[in-house]
Image: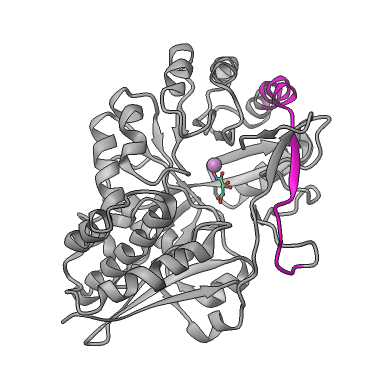
Amino acid sequence: MSIERADVIVTSPGRNFVTLKITTSDGVVGWGDATLNGRELAVASYLGDHVASMLIGRDEDRIEDTWQYLYRGPYWRRGPVTMAAIAAVDMALWDIKAKKAGVPLYQLLGGASRSGIRAYAHASGTDYQALANAITGYQELGFTAVRVQTGVPGLGQVYGVSAAGPGVRYDYEPAKRAADGSAATAPTEESWDTAGYLAHMPGVFERIRADFGTGLRILHDGHHRMSPIEAARFAKDIEPYKLFWLEDCTPGEDQTALRLVRQHSTTPLAIGEVFNSVYDYQTLITERLIDYVRSAVTHTGGITAMKKLLDFAAIYGIRSGIHGPTDISPIGMAAALHLDLAIHNFGIQEYMPHNEQTLEVFQTSFTFDDGFLHPGEQPGLGVELDEDAAAAFEYTKAYLPVNRLTDGTVHDW
Ligand code: EZ4
Ligand code: CO
């Protein structure tokens, strides 16, 4: 048997997704997620214009060989566009292999290491009361872990914080279309003040601990906004509140920045959602500068590459915290869940439920129950894309916002 077709499907059920469909000569279909938020069409072209023809006629069972062929073959290695494209091929081939074997994918990755996958939710609010209400709402759904993000006095809209009123569940959608819902032509701009943020946040964590007790797992995302010394001081300041993790405290591309943070604090550190290769982690893992690997399966070369990365991390006592925002399609999310269930060094899984339109396009079999996710028992990844439903949602360009400091300087985020 061999690969007969490789088709790229772009759809926008409220947000954009790029999906690869691989069909074998005996009619087995595998799905892969290739969504790169705000740069979707670059990956669609990479797959459709450059990769698809290379796949036709290949043996679909040769997953490792195909991965190496796509990684080493083109000369140009790594980068988010390339690695998202390779990820989609890899996911689709694993989906096919597991469907042919008649087992859920996690069985081919070694079988289940746990009964459920602890998930964390996104709680946010412009002020403390709204944030506290959001935390309570997620606890009522069974979550034992929440990421907390809140407004900063003096700043307007802050990335990752709901502008909706108290009690309203936040449908976190960071990439923005134009205000009327049509295609964006440029990113929106938000203003940012690191000093105000650093002064405000420790008091927020203090109140959360006082109100919610020691049992709640508190996570926080710094969105790459701090300098190394700012991050070191912040991580030290918030030690008494015993966070589960502080994510992306400094810009991800500077691995040695984490040495400085590590020297000053025992706050656990997580990083990697913008990474696309094990080499982005080489210093971080071998020097034990982080505690959690944040890569998305979709952006790091797929299941084959993520399994190796997480096994490498395991040798150093570092756990998984796989990226799971709404810009990871349900296919990418399912891939994460099969890995989460199988690996020994699982840490936690981010979970932001997709909107109803997305779930019309992608039929999922994974479940959420009382704080825990499970990939389900369908053969393969357990997600099928409905091509008619997908065709009804035309690609609509959207961008992640740009951050500027209050003096107008473009800033990290
Ligand atoms: O900014 O997925 O931890 N999660 C995050 C996300 C990312 C978006 C970028 O596409 O930081 O909200
Ligand atoms: Co993040």
Q: Residue furthest front?
A: 75
Name the quadrant containing residue 381: bottom left
Total number of numbered discs in the rendering = 0
Residue 133 in percent (x, y) is at: 73, 43
Q: Is residue 138 visible?
A: yes
Please give left or right for residue 102 compared with residue 166 in the image.
left
**Range of residues picked out in magenta:** 181-204
Please give left or right for residue 255 compared with residue 243 in the image.
left
Name the quadrant containing residue 48: bottom left
Decide which of 3, 139 is in the foreground and name it: 3
Residue 413 in percent (x, y) is at: 62, 37
Decide which of 179, 379 is in the foreground and name it: 179
Q: Is residue 48 magenta?
A: no
Q: Is residue 355 above or below residue 170?
A: below
Q: Is residue 189 magenta?
A: yes
Quadrant, the N terminus = bottom left
Please give left or right for residue 305 compared with residue 295 in the image.
left
Q: Is residue 270 above or below residue 71?
A: above
Residue found 35% across the figure and 50% down from its top: 340
